[in-house]
Structure formats: structure tokens, C-alpha cells
Image (cartoon, helix red, strand yellow):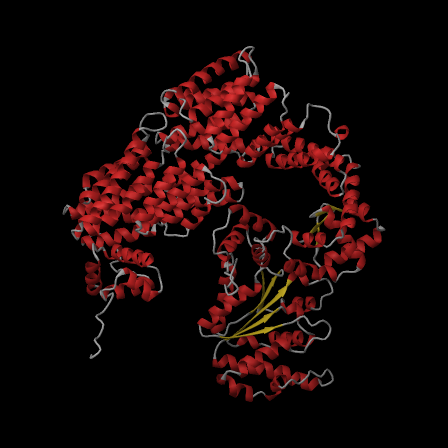
Amino acid sequence: MPQASFVTPVVGRDSELARLSGVLERARRAEARAVLVAGDAGVGKTRLLDEVGGRAAEAGMTVVTGHCVDLGDVGLPYLPFTEMLGVLAADDRFASALAAHPAVGRMLGGGSDSARDVDGRLRLFEGMAGLLADVADVAPLLLVLEDLHWADQSSRDLLRFLLGRGVLRHRLAVFASYRADDLHRRHPLRPLLAELIRLPAVERLELRPLGDSDVARLVRQLERRPLAEATVRRIVERAEGNAFYAEELLAATDTESGGVPSGLADVLLIRFEQLSDTAQQVLRTAAVAGRRVEHELLREAVGLPEEELESALREAVGRQLLVAGGDDTYSFRHALAREAVYADLLPGERARLHGAFARLLAGQGRAAESAAERAHHYRESHDLAEALTASLEAADHAQRVGAPAEEQRHLEAALDLWPAVGAEARPSSGGVGRVTLTLRASAAAAHAGELHRAVSLARSALAELGQDADSELAARVRYTLAGNLLSVDSLTAAFAYSSEALAMIPEDPPSRTWVWAAATHAMAARHVGGNETALRVARRALSVAEGLRMTDAQADLLVSLAVFDGGGRRGPEGRERLLRARELARSSGNAAVELRALFNLAMGYYESGALAECVPWLTEGLDRARRAGLLSSPYPLEMRYLRLVVLHVLGRWDECVRAAAADAELLPAAGAYTVGPALYVALARGDMAAADRARALLEGPFDWMATLVAGIVLTDAAALRRDPGDAVRWTRSTVAALTDEAGARPEVAVRLAALALSAVADAATEPRSAGDEATTRRWTDTAAELVELARATATHAEHGTPQGPEGQAWLARAEAEWIRVVSGPDAAAWSRALTAFGFGDVYEQARCRLRYAEALVAAGRREEAAAEAREVRETADRLGATPLREQVDVLVRRGRLADTPDTDERVVLTAREQEVLRLLALGRSNRQIGEELFITGKTASVHVSNILAKLGAASRGEAVAIAYREGLITPERSASG
């Protein structure tokens, strides 16, 4: 939970901050302006003005703030200006200015504003203008007026006078905020704003709601612990760009209630309670309808004469609770306001109104379009039989328009209602039963990317089967469950259920059920190491499918054979099968199978190192998924990931980050892993918080791809911070988690091993130089384990054949790191690794080129090393890879590669690293450094490693010597000095 002392960060307001900062700059030149800052309650006006005020104070301006307070009809005159004067009076610099304007002193003495004393009021106003001018002559001045919508009449008059009488000709700026959503038609501030905005020196700045990505960033900055993507997405949806709402919703994430937090509800209901009784009645009725309601429907439901209804609506719109649409509809200005009004209804009142809306919708003759609304209203009015019928209609409509998530939701609602509705009132046509309905919900969940929910629903269908269940239905349930289990990597269980399904249905006579059971069993057998069984069953099922003219099943089986048989999807035979499968699936209209074919075509080209050929298949696949409403299903999710991987590998990092941000807006919770390549970019650019975001992927049920992405990020992050122990631990745990029941290691193991080896090689350098044989042997043993893992994985891939170009490149890097551990950098080994990544991986080529340059320096080939270092620096700068740039700069300094142009020779240490270096020079151990700086010994060790890297030093002593030589530290004077 956010800490009470934690200051809310400013996000998404760069342009506004720049604009206000520009006004302050002009104020310092006596060219100031006043800015009226408008925005809804909670949108961030106060935080923005606090930030600007802080910057103004840092720049030497005097900042005084006055707050207007809602005191109803008995407001205190000049309250915000009195508060400002109190601040100025407490500052000795302005004593003479205050003494020169005694009329103003009446405010500080608590004097009242007399409407009868016109001359006194004018003297007060002129005195205030003169005082502010004199204060601004002493130091540039910023006046901030908060909540101008609550200002008393006297304060409004004084503000009008000040801004209209040239006070802004001095070194002074005025920022005044007000709530735009509080300004109803007759609000007293409206005429003043209209008048002020016409003045040449006054401008208006409207704070609009934050974008979704900015709200997500705000939530993550407020919460110190990692948050699940689904939690962030839900807060973003409900906050609708309002920073205060987002904070309140975040604070309520640990509560069990899913409604509006009580404190927020109180705020939201204040304006509602100021309405007339009739307007409140209309809003309550509208809240039951939903966020948006048609005028005609609302009129019928509320039962008021047209004239009274229009008067009430005008009042609600004037108070900015409702917004009138151009299509004769009304919407709540904010969804949370609607939730608060709805929650305030009495239970009986709520049920009655829901029933009224259900009946009105049923009579409109728009069955398909209104089915979802009718289902909701019937359910809330406790008419369960009608709710069941409408839920099934809504599911059918969602299926027709390609909306699997909505189809799943309506089907699950129907399943909840099923036992509460008598058999005579349930649907009696189309073979609808609880088991078939559950199977359909499972399929919809899978298409929506809710894979674990799909498994749960399929298990429920299995539990519903009776002893005398039809064997074909029983088989369908089992092979559906098996397919769902494969998608969540529960492979042994999947094989058991697919075996049961196949045993329940005879192969002869041929049937569709047997073909699909066989197709599922072939995939399950393959995943548990039964390669021969998988090929035999798939070939036989393909023959039967051809005989039955089941083109979609033929396509699915051809994809399996393309992946399982011969050279796999990388070979020409595999590609030919995949192309044929794509055409068959397309002709059959089975989008899910077509997407499987397209994904495997793309993967085949990617694994062959043909990145350019991979992209068109991904584009086609994602377009097909979009048209079918299946973008959240498993294969399109993997296509999204692969598309970002290709952008990352090709060095198109900004494009990768933008695409990932766009994807994140749409992904289901199970698809969070797909933005992984953007985390690779963030880490390579020095954002170590990427490791926290990767760790969040491991929360919840096991997800194979999420574990893979997290493993890559966390291993590489450990290597970058020179923590070999952590790098090795993440490699081991990730490989163990991804190894299947048959003992087959994941292909990514070679990459993980190479990344961990880089950290181990760094750790082995110092003890080897110092002759510490025990430590060197320990790291060498660990490195031997890692390089064997890389070799075994790269040479025996999924099909028993060596991995493609990418896997071989990572193996080459692992071999080069292994040599670095046992004997130091080897130019030939790094040259091989550099060449191996030539299939297109820009960043990894640069990392290998850096090591190659390092090996050239060690071999005395400095001119060649300088040329390689220049290329690394250019790539690092183009990618924005700050850590890589720092590493090459260290090499240039250490290797004295002076002919490398434009290299910054200065070593830049952080403030913490400077402290650690000072203690290092005093001979402190890591533990002692930690104790003195109140950090752990492990953290101190990381800082020491970073210092050694930046200085290009092989030992602590060498680091201190270099630091003295370069003036980073100076000898401390003795006590007698």
C-alpha cells in the first residue's frame, strides 16, 4: 500500500509543466502572465501546481499559496489573500513593503470588508496591488490560488482588480486553479472567468484526464511492490484518467469489496446530494440503466412527465453529473460517479428498476443487440428464467461478432443460473445441456486467452458427466480437457486424458470425434516424449480425416506432422505442409487452426535466421486473428511476442517499445509475457526496474512463456549488476521450471547459460589475477556446468537435431565466455561468436564485439581494438544502450585506445559509488562498507563491482590507484595536519 509520506509523482504532464515553467521564466523578466488552471476534481491540479511551485522556489522565486475553502453561504472575505499575506508578513525581506501599505494590514488584523465603505475597499485593493508590486521588486513572486470555484465574492473582486490593473507588469505570476466540473450554469465564478480570459495577460490551461499508459505508470510508481497486470488494468479502466481516483482505487486493492472505496464514494456523492429530489430520482434510475441511457428508455423507466424529466436532466447536466450525447442519450460524466449513485440505492428499489428496464428492452424488438442488457437486468431483478434465456442469446450474439471474452462471460452467467431454473424453463432445443454448455464456455475461455479458466471449465464438464453419458460426448470432454492442459503445460495429465478419449471411440466406423481425439493425442504424445506414437497416430488420423473430408482436421494434423516429422518446420518439407495446412484451414473457415499454421510458418523462418521472411507471416496471422476476434488466444499471443522479438533483434527498439505499449492495452492477464522484448530493451538501456516487472510475471499460476521471459530478464539483470550467484540461480531455476516431464530441456537454456557465464567470467577475473586458486576453481566448476548445459541444449534441440542460427550463436558466446573463465579473453573465440550473431541480432553482435575488442587489447592489437570499440559505441548510441556505452568507454580508458574519437574520457560515478570508493580507499571490507553506509554487504559488493568496471580495474587496489590518479578521490588529511 502507498505510504502516507510518499509524494504522488507527476506523470503525463510534461507539456503542462513546460508551459507553466515558461510563464515563470517570463515572470522573472517582468513579462508575466496569469494562468487559470481548469480540471475536474482529482485530475491533478494541486499536484501540478505543487511541482511548479517547487521549481519556482528552487529558481529563487518567492512562492505564496492561498486556499479557497467551501464554507457555504458564510464565506470569510479575502480568505486566500489573507493566507498569502500571512506568509509574506513572516518574511523579513518584505517588512518595509508591508509598512508602506497600511491599508493591507487590516486583513492581517482580522478586519472585515465593509460593502458600505467604498473608498476603504478601493484603498485596500490598491494597497494590495502596490504591495505585490513592491514584493516582486525584492524577489520574483508566484501567487498560487487553489480552488477558485470556492472563492468568496470579495476574493473574486480583488482578483479581478489585480489582473485588470496591470500588476502583471512586475516580476510576478499568478496561477489559479478551479474545478471545471463544479461550474454549473449559474455558478458565480463563470462570469469572472469569461471576463478574465479576455485580458491579454491571462490564459487558460485545461488539465485533461491522463492517458491510460500514464495512469498505469502512476499506479506502478505509487505502489512499491510489483502489481499484477490485471490489477493495474482494472484500476486504469475504472479511474478513467483521474489521478485521485486511481490512488483511491489502488489503496482499496487489498480490501475484499469490489465497489467504490467509501472515502471516494463520499466525495462522488457530494454533488449528487445537492440536486433536487426529482433530479436525484432521475439519476438513480439512470444509474440502474448503466453508464449510458437513451432518453426514451429513461423516460419510460422513470415515469415522469416530459417537462419534469427535462428540467431534472437540465439540472444534472448543469451540475456536470450527466453529459448529453448527440444521439439522444445521456451518460454519467464518470463511471465511478454512476457506481456511487447505484450503490446508494435500496435493494428493493434496485430490483424494481432493473425489472422495469428488462421489460422495456424486451419490448423494443432488438433481441440480439439488447440480449446482454436484458440478461443483466433480469438477473438483478431476480427473474432467473428470463435471465438464462437472455444470457444464451447474448452468448450467441458474441460468438457471431467474434467476441470470445464476452461469449465466455455470458455462458458462465448461464451456467450459474442453470441449477436455479427449473427444467421446464430451460432451453429445450439445439441439444443444449449443462455439459455441452460448459464445453462451449471452455472453448470461449481458451479463445479469450483465459487458459487456466478453460482448464477449470473443462474439468467441470468432466465432473458433470454421468455414468451413462454418451461415449462421444465423454470423449469430447476428455480431448477438450487434454488440449487445454497442453496450453498450460500440464503435459502428463494431458496425455492421460487424450489416451482415455481415444480409447472411448472406435476408429471404425470413422467419425469426427475420433479424428479430433487422435489429433489431440498426437500432440500430447509428442510433448511427453512419445515421438513414434505421435507420428503414427497423426498419420493415421490424417488418412481418416481425408476420407471424411474434414478439411480443418486435415489442416491441424498437417501442422502437427510439419512440426514433428523430418526437419521440422525449418525444413522445406515442413514448410510445404504448413502452407497446405494454411490453405485447408482457410477454406474450412477454422480460424484457430489457420492461426496455428501461420504461427509455425513464422517460427520456422525465425529459427532459420530468416527474420525478414518471418515478418509477413506474423502480419498475416495477427490480421487474421483480429478479423476473427481471436487476438487474445494462444497462437496470436505468441505471434505478438515473436513480432516484438524480431523488432528487438533487428535493433528497431523504439518501434518495439511502442508496439509493446500498444499491445499492453489489449492483452489478457495470461498474455503479459508478450511484452517481454520491451523488457529486454529497458534492461539494455539501463532500466534495472525491468527486473521487478519481470518478477511480477511469475505471480499466479505457472505460465511457460512468462517463466521464460522472466528468466531471461532476471538472469541478464544479475549479469549486468555483476552478481554471478544470482545469475546462476535464475538460470538453474528457470531451466528446471521449463524442463518437461520427459526431461527435455527448453531451447532457451543455451541463452540463459551464456548470460550466466558472462557474470561468472567477470567474477573469475579478479581471483585468477590475484592467484586465489580456491575461488577460481569454484567459479570454474560452475562455468563447466553452464557450458555443458549450453552444449547439450544447442546440439540436441526439440527434434533431436541441432538448433538453428540463433541457438548456435548463443552456444558460440557460451564457449567464448567459458574460455574467458579458464584462461582470459580469446580473440578467435569472440570472433566466432560475433560472426554467429550475424544473422541479424544487432545488440548481441555489439556485446560480442565489445568482448572481441577486449581480447584484442589483451593480445596487444590496439589499433584493431580501437576500430571495434568505435563500432560498439556507435551501436550503443543508436540503440540507447547506456550500460554498453559505459562498458566500451571503460575499455577505451583501460586499453588507452586514444584514437577512438569523441569518447568521453571522464569516469562518472554515482553519489553512492563515490561514498563506497572513499571507504574502499580506507581499506574497508564489503561488510564494513555496508555497516557505515547502512546497506547490506551484498549491495556494497555490487557497488564495488560497478566501480571496478567503470575504472577498468582488475582489483580493489588497482581501482583505488586509478581513482587517485584521475582525481576521483584525494588523500585524506591526517589528524595532525
Q: Is residue 248 above or below residue 828?
A: below
At 44% from the left edge and 48% from the top edge, which residue is drawn? Answer: 693
Outermost residue, front side? 467
Residue 45: image quadrant is bottom right
Position of the C terminus, as image quadrant, is bottom left
Residue 428: image quadrant is top right
At 63% from the left edge and 72% from the top edge, which residue is drawn? Answer: 68
Residue 751 position in % (x across, y down): 33, 38
Is residue 963 visible in the rendered image? The answer is yes
Question: Which is more toward the observer, 165 or 700?
Answer: 700
Question: Which is more toward the observer, 341 or 573?
Answer: 341
In the image, taking residue 417 as reference, residue 621 lies left or right, namely left
Question: Which is more toward the observer, 320 or 538?
Answer: 538
Is residue 897 visible in the rendered image? The answer is no
Outermost residue, left side? 860
Q: Is residue 494 above or below residue 1?
A: above
Residue 264: image quadrant is bottom right
In the image, taking residue 336 as reference, residue 946 lies left or right, namely left
Residue 652 position in % (x across, y down): 39, 42
In the image, taking residue 747 as reference, residue 662 lies left or right, namely right
Residue 64 position in % (x across, y down): 54, 75
Q: Is residue 546 above or below residue 386?
A: above
